[in-house]
Amino acid sequence: MFEGTVRSNLDPLEEYTAEQIWEALDKCQLGDEVRTKEGKLDSTVSENGENWSMGQRQLVCLGRVLLKRSKILVLDEATASVDTATDNLIQQTLRQHFSDCTVITIAHRITSVLDSDMVLLLNQGLIEEFDSPTTLLEDKSSSFAELVAEYTMRSKSTY
C-alpha cells in the first residue's frame, strides 16, 4: 500500500466511482472495516500501509484487481504473510469473483492450489509434475499427493 487514502490506494488514477470502490471493498470483505473508519474512503493510509494488518493489505490489493476486472491474475505468495482465516477469505473471493479469469498462483501453501484447474509442481527449479489436482492426487506416488498427505497429517496433529 502507498501513503495516501483508502481511495487513492484502490483507485490511484481516479477512474472509478465511489459506488464501484465500495462494491470492490465489499467483495474483498473490507467494506465493513472501511465504513468504521472516520474518513471512510478518505481514511489515511500510512507509508507501506503500516496502519493496516498484513491481511488487510492483501485484501486491498485484491480490491484493486476487482476494480480493474483483470482477466489474468498472477498471485505470488499472496497468502504467505496472512493468517489462515484471511487465507480462506482470499481463496473464497478468488473462487467467487475470478472464476472467469486466468489465475496463476505461486504458492507454498497446499491449500492455495487444491481447487485449481491445473498444478505445476517445481522441484529445484525443474518441472516435476503438471496435471489437474485430482489426477495428481489419484497417483499416491506423485509428489503432489505426498505433499497433500503430509499437510493433512500435520494439520490433524495440531488439533
Image (tube, rainbow, N blue to C red):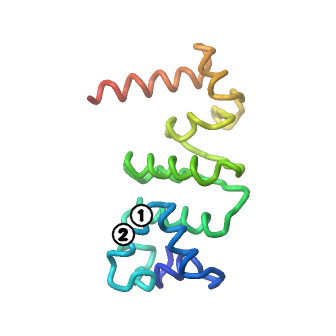
Residue 152 or residue 64, whichever sits in front: 64
Q: On the picture, is 148 further left or further right than 43?
A: right
- Measured as percent of width and height from the top left, residue 84 is found at 38, 45
Residue 121 picture quarter: top right
Quadrant in which residue 19 is drawn:
bottom right
Using the numbered discs, state the Cα–Cα distance from disc 1 to disc 2 in whole angstroms: 9 Å
Q: Is residue 61 left or right of residue 116?
A: left
Amino acid bearing label 1: Gln
Q: Secondary structure at mark 1?
A: helix
Q: Which mark is residue 56?
A: 1
Q: Which residue position holds label 2? A: 33
Q: Residues within 10 Å of mark 2 (few under 14, many from 20)?
A: few
Horizontally, residue 28 falls left or right of residue 40, namely right
Between circles 1 and 2, the one closer to the viewer is 2
What residue is at 33 percent from the left and 25 percent from the top? 156
The type of residue carrying mark 2 is: Glu
Q: Position of residue 68 (x, y in %)?
A: 66, 69
User: Element under label 2?
Assistant: helix
The location of residue 25, given as percent across then percent down, is 49, 68
Disc 1 or 2, which lies upstream in sequence? 2
Q: Is residue 116 above or below residue 130?
A: below
